[in-house]
Image (tube, rainbow, N blue to C red):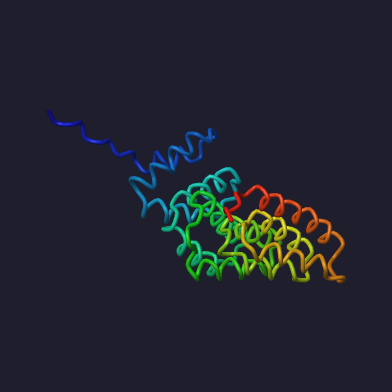
């Protein structure tokens, strides 16, 4: 007996489903894009990151997050070449999606550089999104986030403190404690650091201790 051939979905139908209000149908659509039309789909999804239609733009960001490693360099290239704030923000948010979907995935130098440049983006939305994305990247981004908490932007510092509190790395607690001990630390940042240190210490206390 011959098995029935797999029916490949039409790419146009998949992009129509991407605009569907049901998130489940959207997810089915971009999962099929990765499986059947990876190169064609990624190119089109990157082109949708400047969409004024917020729902479609967000769906495109989610879709690119499923492509994983394959999306990292194209996103860096688009971010670096774009003069549109919406596109740049979408690229950075897509990085957060990739990191969330693929925990521990190493980001190439180009991607880490794009995220670091984004911290100083003229758009505050892009800068905050970069901090959140770095938090999702995790341990690889620890040193960059530690630099952010020592910067002159309290809003970014607070976001970076919260991001660091989710990363299990010895340098995190030391960095937060140093910020707390610094008399020049902004009062709002200081409050966030106190809360973050409690979370870090709680996480450490819950980790299994090695037998002596």
Residue 65 to residue 12: above or below: below
Depth check, front residue: 91 or 163:
163
Residue 82 quadrant: bottom right
Q: Residue at x 78, y 67 (%)?
A: 179
The residue furthest left is 1
Depth check, front residue: 124 or 1:
1
Q: Residue at x 71, y 55 (%)?
A: 162
Q: Residue at x 46, y 49 (%)?
A: 66
In percent of width and height, residue 1 lies at 12, 28
21 lies left or right of 195: left
Depth check, front residue: 83 or 205:
205
Residue 97 to residue 85: above or below: above
Residue 106 to residue 54: above or below: below
The residue furthest front is 212
In percent of width and height, residue 103 lies at 51, 53
In percent of width and height, residue 211 lies at 57, 53
Residue 178 quadrant: bottom right
| Total numbered labels | 0
In percent of width and height, residue 129 lies at 64, 57
């Amino acid at each position: 007996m011959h098995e029935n051939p797999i029916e490949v979905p039409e790419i146009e139908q998949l992009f129509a489903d991407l605009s569907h209000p049901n998130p489940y149908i959207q997810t089915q659509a971009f999962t099929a894009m990765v499986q059947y039309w990876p190169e064609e789909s990624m190119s089109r999804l990157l082109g949708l990151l400047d969409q004024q239609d917020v729902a479609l733009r967000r769906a495109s960001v989610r879709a690119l997050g499923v492509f994983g490693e394959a999306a990292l360099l194209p996103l860096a290239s688009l971010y670096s070449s774009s003069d549109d704030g919406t596109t740049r923000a979408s690229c950075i948010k897509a990085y957060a999606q990739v990191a969330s979907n693929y925990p521990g995935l190493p980001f190439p130098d180009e991607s880490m550089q794009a995220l670091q440049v984004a911290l100083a983006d003229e758009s505050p939305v892009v800068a905050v999104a970069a901090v959140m994305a770095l938090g999702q990247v995790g341990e690889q981004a620890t040193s960059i986030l530690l630099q952010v908490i020592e910067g002159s932007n309290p809003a970014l510092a607070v976001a970076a403190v919260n991001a660091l509190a989710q990363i299990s790395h010895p340098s995190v607690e030391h960095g937060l404690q140093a910020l707390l001990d610094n008399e020049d630390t902004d009062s709002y940042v200081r409050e966030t650091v106190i809360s973050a240190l409690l979370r870090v210490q709680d996480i450490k206390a819950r980790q299994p201790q090695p037998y002596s």
